[in-house]
Amino acid sequence: MRNEYKKQQVKSNWRRWLLEILFPDKKFDGQFQNPGTEEIFDFDDVITADNPITLITQDITYYPEGDDRELFAIFIPGLGQPEEISSKRSRRYARILNTGVANLNNSSFLKENPIFSFLNKYLDWIDAAIHRIGLAGSPAIINTASLIIYAIENDKNINFSGDSHGTILLARAINRAKRKFISKHTKFWNFKARKNQEIKWENRTDQLINVFAFGNSYKKWVKGPKYIMVSIKGDVVPEKFGITRDRANKKGRNDIKFIIFEQIFSQGSFEAHNMMFTTELLRQTFMKNNIPIGDFAGLYAQLKASTLKLATAKEVNWSNDIDEYVWNQESLEEIRR
């Protein structure tokens, strides 16, 4: 599917026209995409449909071959991934973990022929830093928050997933959804009513919203949803910038569960942040614990009961295509020693 045809599937806000002309992938920011067909779905069309969740389940979610189609996650990719690259990685995510995946695009500043090539490769990093300190919004934040509000008000279960920069957008979206939910049902000055609505928010999201984050890079995850934070020891992003087990314990956040695999790369290697390795470790963990691959409810139950046994790198039969997704070819030697 040609890029120009994909662009025709999205209705742009006129305020973003210049940005999208300069950086074409920004056209897809916050829009849905089926990772399998790579078809784009305008978010506004989806959220105003008679049943948005059914539409996402049937038309937007990519299911790997043989999947029972009982589970899917709305996934916000990490930075530096134009829509065709994030679709490719999401197809692998779905295949390795035997689950459905629907992308909510986190667009990139990368382009084929940048005017200032020395600067262009750093723009996504700058964008992520600005998002992390809350000085800029994103269609992905606004649209994800709208989905959460829809789920709460219509008693619908939704699973969200994010990788790296995508976890920043996801965390901020959950925070935005909480503020909008409380404000919608009470006045700003009615503190007692706001407290009651906050309790209602926590109860409702605990029942309906599940979050599975790879290499989380944000510390302020609001109470309510069920969280699982997955990383590999030595990944500097969650250890320095995200919520850690120690930080969660100090705040009494037992609602946040952690899966932290053993260190498999040399100290300081950014490859530990590559979720393509993390998904393979997760797959092996399902098998090691006799949990059907993709049964995240079963995984969460054992994690909550502190009985989950984590797979080691030596136990993983690394997929033949892993070399297509590494950032440093020397990493392959480390995991295969």
Image (spheres, grey):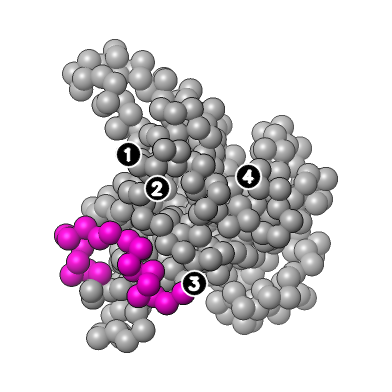
- Callout 2: SS: helix
Query: In the rendered structure, which disc, 2 or 4, sits on the residue that comes first in sequence?
Result: 2
Residue 176 is tagged as 1
- Callout 3: SS: helix
Q: Amino acid at mark 1?
A: Arg
Mark 2 lies on residue: 46
In this view, the residue in front, 134 or 201, is 201
Residue 218 left/right relative to 113: right
Residue 27 in magenta? no
Circle 1 residues within 10 Å: few <14, some 14–19, many ≥20:
some
- Magenta residues (range): 1-20
Mark 3 lies on residue: 85
Q: How far separated are the C-alphas under marks 2 and 4?
A: 19 Å
Query: In the rendered structure, which disc, 4 or 1, sits on the residue that comes first in sequence?
Result: 4
Q: Position of residue 203 (x, y in %)?
A: 48, 23
Task: Determine the residue positioned at 51% across, 54% down.
Answer: 60
Q: Amino acid at mark 4?
A: Leu
> Of helix, strand and loop, which mostly describes the magenta segment?
helix
- Callout 4: SS: loop
Mark 4 lies on residue: 71
Residue 262 visible in this rendered orientation of the protein: no
Mark 4 and mark 3 in contact? Answer it, CB < 8 Å.
no
